[in-house]
Image (cartoon, rainbow, N blue to C red):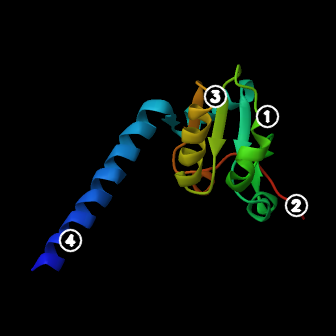
């Protein structure tokens, strides 16, 4: 019976953590549709947080590749005084990247809803 209580407690903690992260992310980063993203990304720093092999297989025209795994080391490449538009494959990594950047003082953060897999605009890929 005590193992059931432990299991319920663990599941409850996971749910609470997930909800807290979700609402925190909603507060610090704007998640926008493709049309809204397309309207604003040319005036911002467009960052693709996917890994280099994903980036090379196709990325939004004008994007810089700063993978989530290298963000801490390469953060100085992103100016805090300009808007930052982030995207990844589905939206999970860009949300985590936004949380990290927000903790480091970046304020104007936007991510693409649905990520690159929902993008229908121009794409550049290595041949």
Between discs 3 and 4, the one toward the N terminus: 4
The residue that appears at 62% across and 50% down in the rendered structure is: 119
* In the rendered image, the vertical position of residue 110 relative to residue 95, given as above or below: above
Between discs 1 and 4, the one toward the N terminus: 4
* In the rendered image, the vertical position of residue 84 relative to residue 9, given as above or below: above
* In the rendered image, the vertical position of residue 4 relative to residue 77, given as above or below: below
**Residue 16 relative to residue 60: left or right:** left
Between discs 3 and 1, the one toward the N terminus: 3
Q: Mark 3 and mark 1: span between their CA atoms? A: 26 Å
Instruction: Point out the frontmost of discs 1 and 4.
Output: 4
Between discs 3 and 2, the one toward the N terminus: 3
Which residue, given by chain and number where applicable, does mark 3 sit on? Answer: 39
Mark linked to residue 126: 2
Q: Residues within 10 Å of mark 4 (few under 14, many from 20)?
A: few
Quarter of the image for residue 62 reads: top right
Please say if the residues under marks 3 and 2 sit with CB atoms less than 8 Å apart.
no
Q: Secondary structure at mark 1?
A: helix
Q: Point out residue 11 in the picture as x, y percentages from the top left corner.
A: 26, 65
Between discs 1 and 2, the one toward the N terminus: 1
Which residue, given by chain and number where applicable, does mark 1 sit on? Answer: 76
Q: Residues within 10 Å of mark 2 (few under 14, many from 20)?
A: few
Which one is in front, 90 or 70? Answer: 70
The residue that appears at 19% across and 68% down in the rendered structure is: 8
**Residue 62 relative to residue 49: left or right:** right
Question: In the picture, which quadrant includes the C terminus?
Answer: bottom right
The residue that appears at 58% across and 52% down in the rendered structure is: 93
Q: Mark 1 and mark 4: span between their CA atoms? A: 44 Å
Q: Residues within 10 Å of mark 3 (few under 14, many from 20)?
A: few
Mark linked to residue 6: 4
Residue 107 in view (yes/no) = yes
């Amino acid at each position: 019976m005590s193992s059931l209580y432990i299991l319920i407690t663990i599941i409850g903690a996971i749910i609470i953590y997930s909800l807290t992260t979700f609402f925190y992310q909603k507060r610090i980063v704007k998640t926008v549709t493709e049309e809204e993203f397309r309207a604003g990304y040319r005036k911002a720093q467009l960052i693709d947080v996917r890994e280099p092999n994903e980036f090379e297989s196709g990325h939004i025209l004008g994007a810089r590749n700063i993978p989530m795994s290298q963000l801490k080391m390469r953060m100085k490449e992103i100016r805090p005084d300009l808007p930052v538009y982030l995207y990844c494959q589905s939206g999970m990594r860009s949300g985590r990247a936004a949380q990290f950047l927000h903790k480091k003082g970046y304020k104007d953060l936007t991510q693409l809803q649905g990520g690159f897999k929902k993008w229908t605009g121009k794409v550049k890929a290595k041949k």
